[in-house]
Image: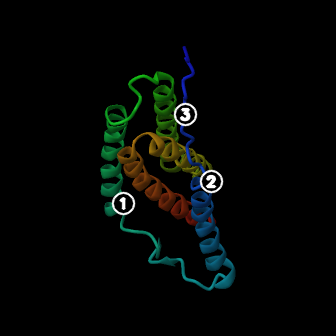
Amino acid sequence: MNTSVSSTKTKKSTGVVFPLLILMLSNIVISVIYLFFVKNFNYSFIVNGEPTFAMSHILLLWITFGMIIMLGIVPYILFNLSNFKTDRFGLRLNYTLYYVHFLLFLLWAFFTFTLSLPIVGVIILGVATALLLFVVYRFMTNSIVAGCLLTIWALWLMYLFVLNFAYVLL
């Protein structure tokens, strides 16, 4: 009696993630180098007391509220549309990383606006953005819908990071 069972394990393709991360980070570095070194600081960053590349504060507020509502939908989608019915440890790890990122985002707002420490806020926002990129990777490998929604939030958080970083440099 032959009881050999052929088990094939599927390997996750991580070859695409690192080039995408390098591409996103290189875009940020190239834009900072262009604005500060190619333009030789001759670019007028402030017009009427506000940065010229910033959106209206009302628009920023409503977009952020919409994103926070979307952030409430993402864990629900991850739980219902993923393969975590049996892998409870993976689900707990994803949720833990997700909520740590969200806590860092709230700490950024606290340090930047309440305590008026924008440098500390930028550092916290940078850590939250880096953690969010890892969370997007983890969510994307388990539920493509949750990963795509979180990608929109990641792009928004990168915009906030660049905006706050420019504010600190002013």
Regarding residue 170, the answer to whether it shows in the image is no
Task: Identify which residue is drawn at 62% across, 86% down.
Answer: 42
Q: Residues within 10 Å of mark 1 (few under 14, many from 20)?
A: few
Mark 3 residue type: Thr
Q: Quadrant of the C terminus?
A: bottom right
Regarding residue 102, the answer to whether it shows in the image is yes
Q: Judging from the image, what secondary structure is the residue with disc 2 in?
A: helix
Instruction: Residue 145: give x, y in percent of width and height.
Output: 35, 47
Residue holding disc 1? 60
Q: Residues within 10 Å of mark 2 (few under 14, many from 20)?
A: some
Mark 1 residue type: Leu
Which circle marks residue 123 in the picture? none
Residue holding disc 3? 8
Q: Judging from the image, what secondary structure is the residue with disc 1 in?
A: helix
Q: Distance between the residues labelled 2 and 3?
A: 50 Å
Residue in the foreground of this view, choosing between 121 and 157: 157
Task: Identify which residue is drawn at 54% across, 82% down.
Answer: 44
Instruction: Residue 56: give x, y in percent of width and height.
Output: 36, 67
Q: Between disc 2 and disc 3, whose residue precedes?
A: 3
Residue in the foreground of this view, choosing between 94 and 6: 6
